[in-house]
Image (cartoon, rainbow, N blue to C red):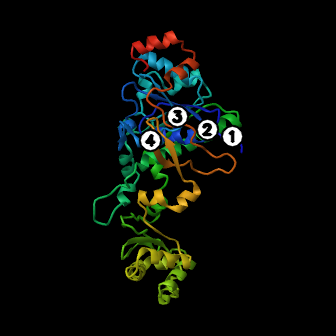
């Protein structure tokens, strides 16, 4: 097996919480050396988010695997000097502060590019580095609203809902990681220099909006919330069973015919007006009622078995408990277990996507706060005496 693709790539992570660190985690999983800069004291706030074990979030263990932690106070000039020194030798710098913050600290792109013309800077923010909203605070929830996602989520006539995950952050992180890979290819394979990747949370989600804007621009159509269904694509919905709900996606033409035959509704399956999606979309309520009447008389397992026999895409609605015990997840190695610094075993998603020749790997547990400060700064040329003096002044910890 060949080595990891990003081995030898040095990443300096200045971000906190989710978007920037998620991008760095993605690169680290494929071999990049990620040095995470954290403020002395509490460190990255994610260390205290959600459920804690012995004072540390188990989310932190998944988000910060394969990283090194260095405590530096970026608000002090000497701390800024340290970052400039590390950036001069880095391939990538990742940050997700509000635009203008790095400039205030003397860490602007212009400054760092002059020190290291090969440096690639990933900047993730709520609204991007330019535009009238650039300097406003922007979290994932606001980006999801601005991108149109929140408008669509929920039942008609009810308040918008969220997915229960910070999709804006992680999707922006994935866009940022993609931008880094493109910039590395341009720099290393085509003889270019470093450049800035400007990734906005709202734009990353907007990029996933499919036909939303084209339909509005051509027809003036505003897609409205539709609950569990997918407007204009039929049938695709959550259908009631005696013991819960199942998802059935019978929206392919041949699949639809097989579905209708399996539930005993050949009258709908052979109706020429319903042979294609546009016709089915016009009569979706009638089709959904027929499917729901059939599933409502059966249990989830019986419905899923019938759908498998008819080769119709379907599935139960998983909780995380279902995921943890599912045989397909296990067979694919989609869940990995890591021992945290506290000694507890933590299950987390494995490395994705799966590469055949150069797969990613979880090599190291998440670091304790400042665990690698001395090792990283010593490698950067700071003597023990210099480090002790900086530590005494609270610049490093």
Task: Compare marks 4 and 2 and give the one earlier in the sequence.
Answer: 2
User: Where does the image place residue 359, in percent across and percent down from the top left?
Assistant: 64, 46
Task: Compare marks 3 and 4 and give the one earlier in the sequence.
Answer: 3
Left or right placement of residue 94 versus residue 149 in this view: right
Residue 344 got which mark?
4
Nearer the observer, 42 or 84:
42
Residue 31 got which mark?
2
- Identify residue for label 1: 3
User: Where does the image place residue 134, in percent across and percent down from the top left?
Assistant: 40, 37
Give the Cα separation between the discs numbered 2 and 3: 10 Å
Residues tagged 3 and 1 counted as in contact (Cβ below 8 A)? no
Using a 10 Å C-alpha cutoff, classify the residue at mark 3 as few (fewer than 14 neighbours), some (14 to 19) or many (20 or more).
Answer: many
Quadrant in which the C terminus appears: top left
Residues tagged 2 and 1 counted as in contact (Cβ below 8 A)? yes
Task: Compare marks 2 and 1 and give the one earlier in the sequence.
Answer: 1
Nearer the observer, 210 or 300:
300
Task: Compare marks 2 and 3 and give the one earlier in the sequence.
Answer: 2
- Identify residue for label 3: 67
Which residue is at a point 61% across and 31% down the rendered structure image?
194
Of badges 1 and 4, the one in the foreground is: 4
């Amino acid at each position: 097996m060949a080595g990891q693709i990003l081995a030898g790539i040095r990443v300096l992570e200045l971000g906190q919480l989710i978007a920037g660190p998620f991008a760095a985690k993605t690169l680290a999983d494929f071999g990049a050396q990620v040095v995470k800069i954290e403020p002395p004291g509490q460190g990255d706030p994610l260390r205290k988010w959600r459920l804690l074990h012995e004072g540390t979030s188990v989310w932190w263990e998944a988000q910060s695997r394969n990283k090194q932690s260095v405590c530096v106070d970026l608000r002090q000039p000497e701390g800024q000097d340290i970052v400039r020194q590390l950036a001069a030798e880095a391939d990538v710098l990742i940050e997700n502060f509000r635009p203008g913050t790095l400039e205030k600290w003397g860490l602007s792109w212009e400054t760092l590019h002059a020190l290291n013309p090969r440096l690639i800077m990933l900047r993730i923010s709520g609204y991007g580095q330019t535009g009238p909203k650039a300097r406003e605070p922007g979290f994932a929830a606001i980006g999801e609203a601005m991108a149109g996602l929140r408008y669509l989520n929920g039942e008609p006539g009810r308040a918008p809902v969220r997915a229960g995950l910070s999709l804006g952050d992680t999707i922006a992180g994935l866009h940022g990681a993609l931008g880094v890979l493109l910039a590395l290819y341009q720099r290393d394979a085509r003889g270019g220099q470093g450049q800035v990747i400007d990734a906005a949370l709202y734009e990353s989600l907007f990029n996933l909006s499919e036909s939303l804007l084209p339909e509005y621009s051509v027809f003036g159509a505003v897609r409205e919330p539709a609950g569990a269904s997918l407007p204009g694509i039929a049938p695709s919905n959550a259908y009631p069973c005696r013991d819960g709900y199942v998802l059935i996606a019978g929206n392919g033409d041949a699949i639809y015919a097989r579905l209708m035959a399996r539930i005993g509704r050949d009258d709908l399956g052979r109706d020429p007006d319903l042979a294609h999606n546009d016709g089915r979309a016009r009569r979706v309520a009638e089709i959904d009622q027929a499917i729901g009447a059939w599933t409502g008389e059966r249990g989830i397992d019986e419905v899923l078995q019938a759908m498998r026999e008819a080769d119709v895409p379907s599935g139960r609605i998983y909780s995380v408990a279902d995921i943890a015990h599912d045989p397909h997840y296990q067979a694919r190695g989609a869940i990995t277990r890591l021992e945290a610094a506290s000694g507890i075993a933590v299950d987390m998603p494995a490395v994705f996507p799966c590469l055949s020749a150069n797969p990613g790997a979880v090599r190291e547990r998440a670091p304790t706060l400042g665990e690698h400060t001395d090792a990283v700064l010593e490698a950067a040329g700071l003597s023990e005496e210099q480090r002790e003096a900086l530590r005494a002044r609270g610049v490093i910890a």
